[in-house]
Image (cartoon, grey):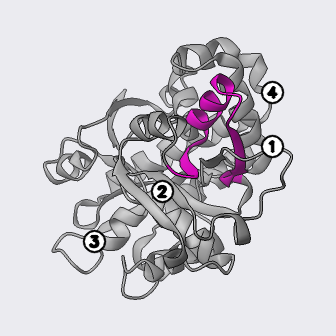
């Protein structure tokens, strides 16, 4: 059994197929013993890549994108786990009122969790621009932990809250005065969570390990999509013990329905969309070309092999 050290920026329900692959020995079938560490703060994943203690990092593609051509060691992205944004927008307004992003947030204050990085703000401001709303016409409270902002939102701060969907559902379950205005998983594809490594350290052995890792992911994605989340409620209860299991079931079923998990191969159109958002946020001077930062060879090989099985 070959040990595959993975360093991840967090522990999230949108990583579910990876956890299933671990629990159901789909990685073990590929002769991989996947060992995951989650550093605090999250940017310790870059240190783990630099010192060789991790074979791969898991996190937002905005990180390797913003470092591209700005530091001596570029990063190459190999695959994705989350094919859509796993966030939600919470509101306090009357549930009977049909939410309109183009009108309802202008002139309002939106709380956005940021402790885990920049992705929440990057996404929501991109979504505003895509819908014809200038982010400068909205006030934001950022740079605070999601749990802290959730407590403050319930206490009266701000008009809207952007947080992860699982936390949003838990807040709504416990507070009848809150409702979900928008599930971001319904707002189109984007390579939200990806696997990457320092480009200069890639070897044939690493490429082979990445392919086998993606084979495990492919099998896990098939497994998750083949059954209603209620059929593995006990596993969800073990994986996410801090939220009611029915909430976890509903979130997973929404993700299953709306294309959160499709393939480890990063779609080019979704990549281009996110790169435009990063350019507009000044994270990159111009959108990166797919082939300049993504090597989808291992993921494509795994997908083709998985289809043939």
Above or below: residue 232 compared with residue 258: above
Distance between mark 1 and mark 2 Cα atoms: 24 Å
Identified at 30% across, 76% down, the residue is: 68
Q: Which residue is mark 2?
A: 120
Q: Is residue 96 left or right of residue 212?
A: right
Q: Residues within 10 Å of mark 3 (few under 14, many from 20)?
A: some
Q: Which residue is mark 1?
A: 95
Pick whichever of labels 2 and 4 is earlier in the sequence: 2
SS class of the residue under badge 4?
loop
Distance between mark 1 and mark 3 Cα atoms: 42 Å
Distance between mark 4 and mark 3 Cα atoms: 39 Å
Distance between mark 3 and mark 2 Cα atoms: 19 Å
Which residues make up the magenta segment? 158-185
Pick whichever of labels 1 and 3 is earlier in the sequence: 3
Q: Residues within 10 Å of mark 1 (few under 14, many from 20)?
A: some
Pick whichever of labels 1 and 2 is earlier in the sequence: 1
Quadrant of image for the C terminus? top right
Q: Which mark is residue 67?
A: 3
């Amino acid at each position: 059994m070959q040990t595959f050290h993975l360093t991840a920026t967090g522990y999230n329900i949108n990583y579910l197929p990876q956890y299933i692959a671990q629990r159901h020995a789909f990685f073990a079938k590929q002769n991989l013993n996947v060992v995951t560490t989650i550093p605090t703060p999250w940017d310790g994943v870059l240190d783990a890549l630099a010192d060789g203690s991790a074979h791969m990092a898991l996190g937002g593609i905005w990180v390797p994108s913003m470092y591209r051509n700005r530091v001596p060691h570029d990063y190459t992205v190999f695959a994705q786990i989350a094919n859509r944004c796993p966030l939600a927008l919470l509101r306090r307004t009357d549930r009977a009122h049909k939410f309109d992003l183009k009108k309802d947030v202008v002139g309002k204050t939106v709380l956005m969790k940021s402790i885990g990085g920049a992705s929440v703000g990057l996404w929501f401001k991109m979504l505003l621009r895509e819908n014809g709303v200038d982010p400068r016409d909205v006030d934001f409270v950022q740079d605070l932990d999601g749990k802290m902002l959730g407590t403050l939102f319930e206490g009266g701060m701000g008009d809207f809250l952007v947080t992860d969907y699982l936390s949003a559902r838990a807040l709504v379950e416990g507070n009848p005065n809150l409702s979900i205005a928008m599930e971001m998983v319904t707002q189109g594809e984007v390579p939200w969570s990806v696997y990457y490594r320092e480009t200069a350290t890639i070897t044939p052995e690493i490429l082979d390990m990445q392919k086998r890792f993606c084979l495990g992911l492919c099998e896990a994605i098939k497994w998750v999509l083949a059954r209603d989340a209620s059929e593995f409620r006990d596993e969800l209860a073990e994986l996410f013990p801090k939220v009611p299991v029915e909430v976890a079931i509903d979130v997973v079923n929404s993700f299953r329905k709306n294309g959160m998990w499709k393939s480890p191969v990063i779609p080019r159109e979704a990549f281009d969309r996110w790169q435009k958002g990063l350019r507009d946020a000044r994270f990159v001077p111009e959108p990166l070309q797919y082939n300049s930062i993504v090597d989808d060879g291992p993921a494509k090989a795994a997908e083709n092999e998985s289809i043939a099985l």
